[in-house]
Image (cartoon, grey):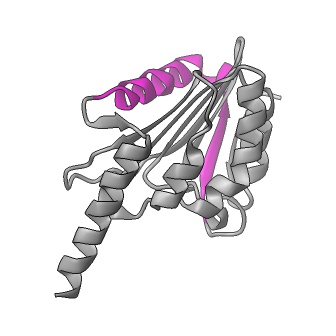
Amino acid sequence: MSSIRLVTENVKKQILEGISNASSIYILTSFVMKSGVELLKPYLIDAAKRGADIKICTGDYLYVTQPEALSRLLIPDFDHVEVRLWHSNGTSFHPKAYLFRHEEEGTFIVGSSNLSRSALTNGVEWNLIMDKDIQPETFEDAENRFLKIFYDDQTVPVNEETINKYTKNIRSITRTIRI
């Protein structure tokens, strides 16, 4: 069914549909929360097992991303799963996009939902969902822009070292604010 539609409740359903048959899964959100990762991780692991290319990019803007969420995003033993962290350096980083491709088909979700349980289930969120065949150029443009951000010099691979550094930065900011 080819369409563009607005989803204001439970976008999780469409995201899980996208993950379930995608050969490429690209997620770009300004922040990730442990609750959102726990919601999607079993499905991402299933996708990784079937060989899907999974790329997830989030940011450090305002230090909202939870270090525990970054740790839980790591799916060991799969070379085709990459997680990267955008260093905002104080510049606003606020995207929320989910792209799913399977052969010639695809779905693009863009809106207000970050990777958190409330944003994906019962929060007040607005998301547009577009099937690739409606506007293939827009889908391709979104994919290309995602990859440009994903591999930008301002992103670093998420691993134990970058998570530890990010955690120290959060603690440093928190101490500064309390003073």
Relative image position of residue 125 (x, y in whole percent): 60, 62
Magenta part, dominant SS: helix
Point out the residue furthest to the right here: 1
Tell me if 173 is positioned left or right of 157 in this view: left
Residue 118 in the image, given as x and y percentages of width and height: 65, 67
On whether residue 119 falls in the magenta region, the answer is: no
Give the percent coordinates (x, y) of residue 28: 49, 41
Segment tinted magenta in the rendering: 125-152
Q: Residue at x 53, y 42 (%)?
A: 97
Question: Could you say which quadrant of the image residue 65 lies in?
Answer: bottom left
Residue found at the far top of this picture? 104
Q: To which quarter of the image does residue 151 belong? A: top left
Q: Residue at x 72, y 12 (%)?
A: 103
**Image position of 157 with respect to 41: above or below:** above
Does the magenta segment cover residue 141? Answer: yes
- Front-lying residue, 133 or 169: 169
In-image side of 148 versus 70 (left or right): left
Q: Is residue 11 among the parts visible in the rendering?
A: no
Going 66% across and 63% down the picture, which residue do you hit?
117
Vertical position of residue 51 compared to residue 152: above or below: above
Quarter-of-image position of residue 35: bottom right
For the point 60% across and 22% down, the residue is: 135
Q: Is residue 105 visible?
A: yes
Instruction: Tell me: 57 left or right of 14.
Output: left
Q: Is residue 40 above or below residue 34?
A: above
- In the visual, does 49 lie left or right of 116? right
